[in-house]
Image (cartoon, grey):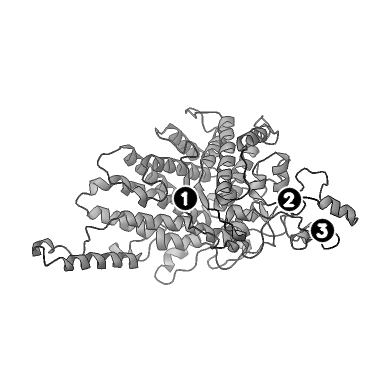
């Protein structure tokens, strides 16, 4: 950021001096500390881009290895907390996202016509809150209200705001931004194409702000259901409301965007990532069209049966030979718990002669990394989905939060819309990626919604909503992990999607390092307030010493 700002200043000064021969001196005799012709919208672009490209890093070191593993959607190796590479969003927020947005607002405040920038100034708070929430989801307390004030206010030791305070601040920032944007002031500067998310569409930014408020409300529930209810009612009563279709959702598409490297092979960092058996069986038994989108087929295709007969080979007993979807199989969530099955993660089944069959499905690599195996597809990155909004609303209505407000539909209606939106969005992503997709996706969704394991019929309705929320977060690991923490689902004793017992202790947060003498006092105070042991990164501590929103949450698998 600093280099970019210096470059802008140099460019401006160069233009000034080279044109001074033809201009009066009074036109250049201005305050040298104020650059008045900077296009502040470029700073907005510089803040949004890191929010999307960071997702590759999150998947490599966290998404597959930690988050989706903890949610038992992905498996493949014994769970072990990496000591490097995790928590990249923390540094990214403070190095690239927040500084640009703060600087943009500072420059706008110096403009003589700053009233024309009222809308885009308000919009800057929305992505800032979205990224900061992800940081706090894993770290709890963080510098925010006093952050990034070293340059202008000489504040080099910002306090750490606790998570409860952060939620209050963020809700106010979102509410204030919505109020300004809904004024619909005239003669406003637009972000236009500098807004790589919504191309300057103010209404969509309002909808994202309201959708973010629902995200925050979900995190309040175990501490303050009354507050969660209040937020939900405010959003539902808002004139614009949250996302109202897949066309609204936060999507980034860039043919030159390679979250797993140009050739896509970084998707296999640490190890290949495999499907978990319980997840695969649920998708199969519920006729979920996302089965083939989420996971790759194994080798049991074509004439494999003839080959097995020829060589008198029998498949392992854990595979049902009459399964119409035999080409999709999952392994144990715990790599070490069932050696009779987990051996096939790395060892193909000997089908006789030179025939070897990979039995356990991997994640659909091309769905995440379209260029893997010389593919030529494009990454469509849905960073906040309409499906999430629908399913979150369904959850709140199911819990009784909608009393006294027009919820614009029943829990079942919102739920059905959410499941359909998720399947369609995932199918669109798959089409762009050149991966497994379906031309009759809505007919497939109809069958899925009619399945007893999916249909809201008065039996395990809340769990069904949780399961669909989890499946929708397959490409948003941070949200999947947050859901698993706050709800305790998948539930160990479930008759729908049961959590497998595992031997590993799983973390529930990440850590922040001692910032050094300049801010050690505030950091230590924050660690103490949260009940954290400073500089202790052991998994047992990361599991038992929880951040604020998680302190009253059930243990993994103990949902009620």
Horizontal side of residue 91 vs 367, given as left or right: left
Residue 277's tag is 2
In the image, 443: left or right of 93?
right
Q: Quadrant of the C terminus?
A: top right
Q: In the rendered image, is residue 531 in sight?
A: no
Q: Are marks 2 and 1 in contact (CB under 8 Å)?
A: no
Residue at x-position 57% and y-position 40%: 424
Pointer 2 or 3: first along the chain: 2
Which dot marks residue 317? none
Of the numbered discs in the image, which one, if any, rests on residue 340? 3
Element type at marker 1? Answer: strand
* Of the pair 281 and 467, the residue shown nearer to us: 281
Give the answer, above or below, for where 450 lies relative to 349: above
Are discs 1 and 3 less than 8 Å apart at CB? no
The correct choice, above or below, for 20 with respect to 288 in the image is below
Q: Residue at x 55, y 43 (%)?
A: 425
Q: Position of residue 234 (x, y in %)?
A: 43, 35
């Amino acid at each position: 950021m600093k280099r970019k700002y210096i470059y802008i200043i140099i460019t401006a000064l160069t233009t000034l001096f080279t044109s001074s021969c033809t201009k009066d001196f009074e036109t250049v005799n201005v305050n040298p500390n104020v650059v008045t012709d900077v296009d502040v919208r470029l700073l907005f672009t510089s803040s949004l881009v890191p929010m999307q490209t960071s997702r590759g890093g999150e998947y490599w070191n966290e998404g597959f290895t930690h988050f989706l593993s903890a949610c038992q959607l992905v498996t493949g190796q014994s769970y072990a907390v990496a000591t490097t590479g995790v928590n990249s969003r923390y540094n990214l927020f403070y190095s690239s996202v927040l500084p640009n947005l703060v600087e943009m607002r500072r420059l706008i405040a110096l403009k003589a016509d700053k009233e024309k920038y009222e809308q885009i100034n308000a919009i800057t708070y929305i992505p800032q809150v979205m990224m900061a929430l992800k940081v706090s989801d894993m770290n709890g307390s963080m510098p925010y209200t006093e952050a990034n004030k070293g340059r202008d206010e000489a504040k080099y030791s910002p306090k750490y705001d606790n998570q409860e305070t952060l939620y209050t601040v963020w809700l106010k920032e979102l509410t204030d931004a919505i109020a300004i944007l809904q004024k619909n002031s005239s003669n406003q500067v637009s972000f236009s194409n500098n807004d790589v998310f919504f191309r300057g569409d103010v209404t969509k930014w309002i909808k994202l702000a309201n959708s973010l408020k629902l995200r925050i409300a979900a995190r309040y529930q175990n501490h303050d259901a009354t507050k969660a209810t209040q937020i939900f009612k405010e959003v539902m009563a808002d004139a614009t409301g949250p996302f109202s279709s897949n066309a609204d959702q936060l999507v980034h598409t860039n043919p030159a965007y390679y979250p797993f490297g140009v050739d896509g092979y970084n998707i296999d960092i640490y190890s290949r990532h495999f499907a978990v058996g319980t997840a695969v069986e649920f998708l199969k038994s519920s006729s979920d069209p996302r089965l083939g989108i989420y996971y790759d087929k194994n080798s049991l295709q074509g004439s494999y049966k003839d080959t097995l007969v020829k060589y008198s080979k029998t498949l392992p007993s854990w595979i049902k030979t009459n399964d119409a979807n035999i080409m999709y199989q999952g392994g144990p969530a715990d790599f070490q718990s069932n050696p009779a099955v987990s051996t096939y993660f790395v060892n193909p089944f000997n089908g006789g002669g030179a025939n070897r069959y990979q039995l356990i499905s991997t994640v659909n690599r091309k769905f995440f990394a379209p260029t893997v195996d010389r593919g030529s597809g494009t990454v469509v990155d849905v960073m906040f989905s309409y499906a999430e909004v629908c399913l979150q609303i369904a959850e709140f209505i199911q819990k009784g939060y909608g009393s006294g407000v027009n919820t614009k539909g029943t829990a079942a209606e919102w739920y059905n819309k959410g499941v359909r939106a998720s399947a369609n969005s995932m199918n669109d992503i798959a089409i762009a990626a050149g991966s497994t997709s379906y031309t009759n996706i809505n007919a497939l969704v109809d069958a899925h919604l009619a399945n007893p394991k999916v249909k809201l019929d008065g039996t395990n309705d809340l769990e069904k909503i949780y399961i669909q929320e989890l499946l929708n977060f397959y490409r948003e690991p941070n949200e999947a992990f947050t859901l698993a923490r706050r709800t305790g689902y998948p539930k160990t004793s479930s008759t729908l999607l049961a959590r497998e017992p595992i031997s590993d202790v799983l973390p529930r947060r990440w850590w922040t390092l001692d910032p050094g003498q300049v801010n050690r006092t505030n950091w230590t105070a924050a660690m103490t307030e949260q009940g954290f042991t400073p500089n202790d990164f052991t998994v047992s501590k990361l599991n038992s010493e929880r951040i604020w929103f998680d302190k009253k949450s059930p243990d993994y698998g103990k949902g009620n």
